Image: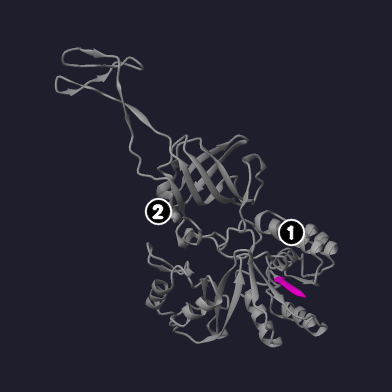
Amino acid sequence: MIIGIDDTDSPNGMCTTYLAAKLKKKFKIKSTLRLIRLNPNIPYKTRGNGAVAIVTDFNHKIRKEVIDYITTYSHLSHKKTNPGIAFVPKLSRKKQIILEKFYRKVVSEHVSIIEAEDTAVEIGAEVIKFKNGRGIIGALAACGAVLDDKTFELIAYREKRNYGQERKINFQSVFSMNEKFYPKCFDSVDIVSNQILITPHGPDPIFCGIRGKSSMVVKKAWNDIIPLEKIEFIQVFETNQASDDHLKWKKIREIKPFDCVKISGKVSSNPKTIQGGHVFFKLMDETGEIDCGAYRQTGEFRDVMKQLCTGDEIIVYGGIGRHSNTLNLEKICIEKLKSILLDTPPLCCGRKMTSSGKNKGFKCRKCNNKIRKVMKTKVFRDIELGWFEVPPRARRHLSKPLVRFNRK
């Protein structure tokens, strides 16, 4: 039996991982808990849009306890909190494929409550809704998650008396841990902005979360962290974080609102910087054209985007936000740079000649000499072929850091 839980938290607190960890401790469940991140573009999400899955031997006592926990501890009074539970029995291979397909869609696209209910009926799963029950989408998807490229996260939880207060942690210990364990542990700090990234900022029970390639390495990394407040307990989750699981290859005309996509195309307009420091350009393929955006908070990544030019061939990774049809960039690969050639004024009488008009060559102001044939000079562009990504401080949970790519 797999039990999926989602949408128990709100902007005011609580955390679905915390409820799952408490259930694991209560029933002495031996299996590793799963933290499954879902489509980051969905407008109904709270914070990281994560659901959890628990693999256990089913009994009615556990079923009742799960329902009681959700009823008691979820932030049901908040309008955005609509919890859901999924109880998924052992499935045939055919039904398992149906559930895996559902996960693939939930992590990448927009899915309705009705689709979740239909999938549950098709595979013989039980789903329980609270309020409008939107949480059954994530709960069911978490049960079907395929972790082909799984990572791990160790989450340390605070004592209840500290909820809502600033997290107290030894700043330097996080940087020292990162220096020792990177890249086995990743996205712990942002070197450029001198930020630690393992501590959230909300009123939830989480003190910090350390992400890495194995359960063992995140536990070792935790031993190097110096918390300056008492920790209630720690829990390790296996996850789909840092996997790019959310991204699907699509043509531009196939893209729908809230999609997470990979697109191959050509830059079709030179980048423009608008008020606020955000950079936008257009990308086209054989099916259409779309706006791409790199925002001020992406810093050095945005500065690379400024160097692009019409005709450059690139691959873009990103998602469609809730308020526009703009593709918010997570990574790009520059495959081919278009050569830019400019007319070079020749020298005459010790000075540069001036233009005689469009396609008319150059003339010398001093001796009136005219030259119709001109030299072309290649413009230097401070940009190279290859991959570029947003910095850790702007990276989404699901985005795969380049340090995790298997590149020769």
Instruction: Report the predominant secondary structure element of the magenta stretch.
Output: strand
Q: Residue 376 location, x and y as percent?
A: 32, 26
Magenta part of the chain: 1-5
For badge 2, the amino acid type reads: Glu
**Badge 1: residue crowd in 10 Å (few <14, some 14–19, many ≥20):** many
Horizontal arrangement in the rendering, residue 94 relative to residue 184 (left or right): right
Q: Residue at x 57, y 45 (%)?
A: 326
Disc 1 marks which residue? 102
Disc 2 marks which residue? 300
Magenta region includes residue 205: no
Q: Is residue 284 above or below residue 71?
A: above
Mark 2 element type? helix
Q: Residue at x 43, y 37 (%)?
A: 309
Q: Earlier in the sequence, mark 1 or mark 2?
A: 1
In space, the residues marked 1 and 2 are separated at their CA atoms by: 36 Å
| Residue lying furthest left | 350
**Badge 2: residue crowd in 10 Å (few <14, some 14–19, many ≥20):** some
| Count of numbered marks | 2
Q: Residue 196 location, x and y as percent?
A: 43, 70
| Disc number for residue 43 | none
Horizontal arrangement in the rendering, residue 385 relative to residue 399 (left or right): left
